[in-house]
Image: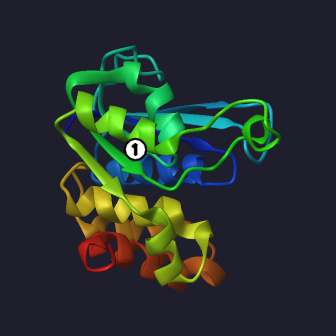
Amino acid sequence: MRIDCLLAGVGGQGTVLASKIIAQTAISNQCFARTSETIGMAQRGGCVVSHVRIGDQNCSPAIPLGMADLIIGFEPAEALRNIGFLKPDGQLLVNTKPIIPVTSSLGGISYQAADMIHYLQSTRQQVVFVDGQKLCAAAGTAKVLNVIMLGVAVKQQLLPFSREEVLQTITENLPAKFLELNKKALEIGYNFQQYV
């Protein structure tokens, strides 16, 4: 198994945790995995990019431009900002719910999420859009968007793991008080068609 996956979002969306779940699932399946993160200036609301490289021990932790097999975008602008990392035949999984940056909400910059989504759709044949807001509402909280997106990625066969393998990683690595909520989130993502 070999896959380079880039996860892009903003602070508070669980981007780093999602990358750790992917890497740990790979390790549990006897595959080499490494991760690296780039975290923006703000703890919440700043850009967060996580690189997960599975299967190649002779590579840097950061995915080179044009080499990602998959980008999971927790926010449309962040998916678009990192599109240069994606291979020509790479796949995109994008949450359509934007998080409006502070500069835009204060009137400094226009933020057109619909235009970004249209651009991603028109330039890539292999893109899956997810209404993250609706799926998070089904879970009862926006705090599990990351695990919902992992569930969608597994169902769409964008990641080389089964639902049971990801569930085992979640069970073994998340605090007990968040376990049932994250199990529910994984199932919602895995069955996302019925919620969209």
Q: Amino acid at mark 1?
A: Ile
Q: Is residue 39 visible?
A: yes
Q: Is residue 171 visible?
A: no
Front residue (pair 9, 169) = 9
Query: Residue 6 in the image: x percent, y percent?
Result: 42, 34
Would residue 180 appear left or right of 4 to someone viewing this image? right
Front residue (pair 47, 57) = 47
What residue is pinned by disc 1? 72
Bin the neighbour count of mark 1 within 10 Å (Cα to Cα): few under 14, some 14-19, many 20 and up. Answer: many
**Residue shown at the point (79%, 37%) measured from the top left:** 107
Corner quadrant of residue 153: bottom left
Up-down relation of residue 94 to residue 8 (above or below): below
Q: Secondary structure at mark 1?
A: strand
Query: Residue 1 in the image: x percent, y percent?
Result: 19, 39
Would residue 71 appear left or right of 180 to someone viewing this image? left
Would residue 159 appear left or right of 33 to someone viewing this image? left
**Residue shown at the point (46%, 68%) measured from the top left:** 170
Quadrant where the C terminus is found in the figure = bottom left
